[in-house]
Amino acid sequence: MAGGGGPVNRSHVDDIHPCYQINIVSFTFKSTPSTICVLLYIFLSSVSAVTVGGNLLVIISIVYFKQLHTPTNSLILSLAVADLLVGFLVLPLNMKYSPLLCFYYPDLLCKVRESLDVTLGTASILNLCCISIDRYYAVCQPLLYRTKINVHVIMIMIVVTWCTSVLVAGGFLVAGMNIEKCQENCFLGILLASMLGPIFSFYLPAVIMVSIYLKIFLVARKQARSLQNTNGHSTKYGPTVRKVEGKATRTLAIVMGVFLMCWMPYFLCYAADVLGKASMPLEVYETLVWLAFFNSMLNPFIYALFYSWFQSAFRLILSGKIFQGDFSNSRLS
């Protein structure tokens, strides 16, 4: 999320962008873009297209197929909407108004891009956190699941998620304007805004997710071993238990591993800069912003493809069958 000024090394101005010629006075698009520039734009455009396409499949599946009209899938739908907007708005705007260019030539569109970065990035993370809470009750409190996680509770989660995202973006925006206006006179307020934003955007949700998924893994392992004990110590149940434990481990490792791999580098560098422990070059900062938003491309495959009914829905959509008749009541396996 490229908001709040960002952790960057502001010590020099040079021709460091592969597609733009940058100097103190102005920037221009290179008349003969380098091979690196062309490949970069092809790659980033592909990421944007895959992000939009993957999340659009999830949205169409949940909206069209009645079997998928569940409270849990409402959270996945909210996540897909946030990630779709990342692919449709944030990624193209970051290509046109990158953090590197916006640092030297800030304008209204740069502010819009920064606000969208923070809002949609935070919404994506908070939706992931809400999904982990839903999974906790489904696995660890199955008897209470339908009473604790209902449509009303899910709607509250979604509203709180999006409102919090807008508030965090507003905090970053205000902090950025204060930096320009009052410089050292309101340093404490700016520091507070700069730290509270990441706490609510990443650190708190990350701690909640890690704690919940660790608990889910322990409960899943306990349930698998209880199954073995219930059916005796027959050797034929050993491979089954190991298979269940292995699948739980792989699933949770992928979920948390991809999330932390994408988002943690940016927020760690941001925290180091705010606390004055390190300063990050603009080029590295811009790379970490893109790495963070790759999570929006991967989310549909991680969260949707774990469920066989989403795979069936995707096949029906991609084959065009839903345009040939009414398949909304189809039984997805």
Image: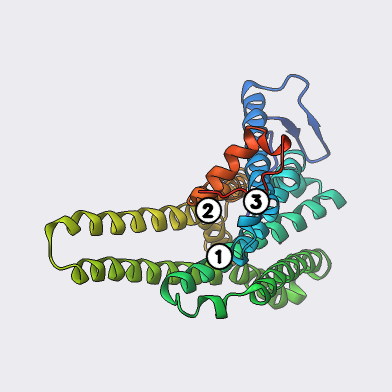
Q: Separation of disc 3 and disc 1 at Cα?
A: 25 Å
The residue beneath circle 1 is 131
Amino acid type assigned to the residue bearing label 1 in the image: Ile
Tell me if residue 78 comes above or below residue 153 in the rendering: above
Disc 2, SS: helix
Residue 50, placed above or below residue 162: above
Mark 3: few/some/many CA within 10 Å (<14, 14-19, 20+): few
Residue type, mark 2 in image: Tyr
Residue at 34% x, 67% y is 220
Q: Residue at x 54, y 62 (%)?
A: 272
Mark 2 neighbour class, 10 Å CA radius: few under 14, some 14 to 19, many 20 or more:
some
* Residue found 41% across the figure and 58% down from its top: 252
Residue linked to disc 2: 303
Q: Residues within 10 Å of mark 1 (few under 14, many from 20)?
A: many
Q: Which residue is mark 3?
A: 329
Q: Is residue 22 left or right of residue 46?
A: right
User: Is residue 62 or residue 328 the one in the foreground?
Assistant: 328
